[in-house]
Image (cartoon, rainbow, N blue to C red):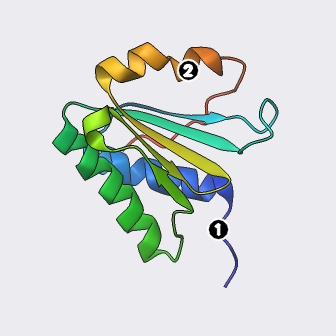
Amino acid sequence: MTTPSAEWKARRAARAALDKRAGDLVVLDVQRVSSVTDYFLICSGKSTTHLETITEAIRGDLKGQGVHVLHAEGVAESGWVLLDYGDVLMHVFLEDTRLYYALERLWGDAPVLPLDPS
């Protein structure tokens, strides 16, 4: 079995998050501006329960495809959960916390990966 690409993981996680009604989801291609990872997935939830639902959907979907999280940080109550898949970092925020950290602004030089509408 071939290892899924970073882009595949980002797209698969985006679909799982959107299926749980994640808000303002964006995937940034940071390959040219970061030596840490290839993609950032950033999305928002409306409550701590919603954050848990989104992060569990991402983890469950990718695990079902044989892709396991390398490291997870934060808890929903903190307003920010980070799932580290090595070549993809997934940030799930409460809306206010996301505004505060403004990752999209910090990584503004990174192009957005277009996602298929559905």
Residue 102 visible in the shown view: yes
- Horizontal arrangement in the rendering, residue 32 relative to residue 97 (left or right): right
- Horizontal arrangement in the rendering, residue 97 relative to residue 10 (left or right): left
> Where is residue 5 shown, x and y percent of the image?
68, 61
Look at the numbered disc 2 and give the secondary structure of its residue.
helix
| Foreground residue among 93 and 24 | 93
On residue 39, which mark appears?
none
The mark lying in front, picked from 1 and 2, is 2
Q: Please say if 1 is above or below 92.
A: below
Please report contact status of discs 1 and 2: CB closer than 8 Å, yes or no. no
For the point 40% across and 34% down, the residue is 43
| Foreground residue among 82 and 116 | 82
> Where is residue 31 shown, x and y percent of the image?
77, 39
For the point 74% across and 42% down, the residue is 36
Residue hosting label 1: 4
| Image quadrant occupied by the N terminus | bottom right
Q: CA distance from mark 1 to mark 2?
A: 25 Å
Which comes sooner in the sequence, label 1 or label 2? 1
On residue 104, which mark appears?
2
| Image quadrant occupied by the C terminus | top left
